[in-house]
Amino acid sequence: MDRIRIIGGNQLNGVIPISGAKNAALPLLIASLLTEETLILENVPRLADVAQLKRILSNHGTDIMTAGKQPGDDEFAGETLHISAKNIVDTTAPYDLVSTMRASFWVIGPLLARMHEAKVSLPGGCAIGTRPVDLFLMALEKLGAELTLDAGYVIAKAPGGLKGAVITFPKVTVGATHVAMMAATLASGTTVLENAAREPEVVDLADCLIAMGAKITGAGTSTITIEGVKALHGARHSVVPDRIEAGTYAMAVAMTGGEVLLQGAKRAHLDVALKAVEASGTTIVETDKGLLVTRLAGDITPVSVTTEPFPGFPTDLQAQFMALMTKASGNSVISETIFENRFMHVQELARFGAKIAPEGIHAHVKGVSVLKGAPVMATDLRASVSLVIAALVAEGESTIHRVYHLDRGFERLEDKLRACGANIERVRG
Ligand code: EPZ
């Protein structure tokens, strides 16, 4: 299994191109199931999760063609995919494909909307918490689906097609917002999603669906209205930049010092997180090329944060910010309100000498002046990159095991960091 070896102590200086967002690309690929025509997606990141979703879509009968390199493409340019779900030959998403990635459950929305039936394996538990699907099921039932649970599968049927409804989410959920929005595009009548997720990835999906002929207003606010249409058509859409990747590298620079341009990143997508990085003693300037992140000297100021749905501090940056706070010149509290078990990086950060005391949803971080290199184990995607951030300043050598977690969501992380001066390499095998 691959490992990442890092020798800490180097500043980061240079340019990091920000890839297309994994969490936008996944629902966008799934949206291809809604039409017989070809959906062309540009700026798709090369990630293990995207590859896995391609397998799942292929199993439904989707043809996916990857366009070759285009004039002007640099080495980090995303892929352009031509996705055609002309004939859906199988409406079952089997356990062995769905169980490895929760977002694959989301195919249930488009399959039900277009084919009026779907049989999708429950995604099961996950390292960061129990992550139930009750709100997906609630939304689909409101749209008129008949649901049964059998042998670990959700069997959904809507013989006469889905019907528009008012769906009020008791809690903000990104996934169920994506699924309800996709399903409602082909329902008869009007659907209103109340307390919908406002994440930029929801807006990106809505923009793509609108380009495909859907009638959607309000994406990016808590109330999304969808007027159903008979059919959607093909479209061309470019995946929004990955705000979590951008925030991660901003935190890495805040940790190591230096100056890095996060090419293509947009401040509005992660303003609250950037404000926290700025409060820690780093300057961030938005330019027409992206975000310029600079930390030249001085201590890291402790800053406490609490994760919240967008526009709040993202749970997907919580581990990275905690890594930064381990070297702050004082104490901070990091509170996780979205997932109940998302502190697994705490015990691994402790291997570097970090002082963190978890207490329920809070982690009390006491900044230390020195972290020391260590062998550590990645546990989930964002936790593993928090270990990279710590290792970049830890004295001596660190080895991060189980790198496949990183490959799920960070495109060529070691290449991007090495180009900015980090002493980092992937050890194959
Ligand atoms: C998305 O997951 C992201 N995944 C996650 O990123 C991200 O952490 C999360 O949103 C929150 O921002 C993708 O976009 C592929 P939710 P999702 O439904 O949609 C509860 C990463 O590292 N809930 O918004 O699965 C749930 O348990 C990943 O890239 C229910 O109770 O998250 C959680 O507490 C990890 N019932 C809260 O809602 C349901 O039916 C928010 O989860 C659904 C969700």
Image: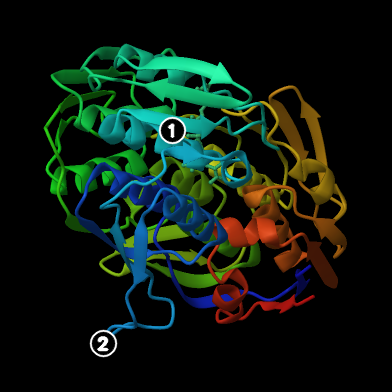
Residue 33 appears left or right of 342: left
Q: How many marks?
A: 2
Residue 369 x, y percent position in the rendering? 80, 56
Residue 135 appears left or right of 10: left
Q: Pointer 2: what residue?
A: 71
Q: Is mark 1 within 8 Å of ligand 1?
A: yes
Q: CA distance from mark 1 to mark 2?
A: 36 Å
Lower sequence index among marks 1 and 2:
2
Q: Pointer 1: what residue?
A: 175
Q: Is residue 132 above or below residue 398?
A: above
Determine the residue located farthest toward the bottom in the rendered image: 71
Q: Is mark 2 within 8 Å of ligand 1?
A: no
The residue shown at (73%, 42%) is 330
Q: Quadrant of the C terminus?
A: bottom right
Q: Depth check: 205 or 186 in front? A: 186
- The scheme the figure's colours follow is rainbow
The local crowd at label 2, few if under 14, some if 14 to 19, many if 20 or more residues have their Cα within 10 Å, is: few
Dot 1: what SS? Answer: helix
Q: Depth check: 36 or 17 in front? A: 36
Residue 202 x, y percent position in the rendering? 32, 39
Does the rendering let one see residue 370?
Answer: no
Residue 218 appears left or right of 424: left
**Where is residue 375, by image quadrant?**
bottom right
The residue shown at (50%, 56%) is 55
Residue 124 appears left or right of 428: left
**Where is residue 9, by image quadrant?**
bottom right
The local crowd at label 1, few if under 14, some if 14 to 19, many if 20 or more residues have their Cα within 10 Å, is: many
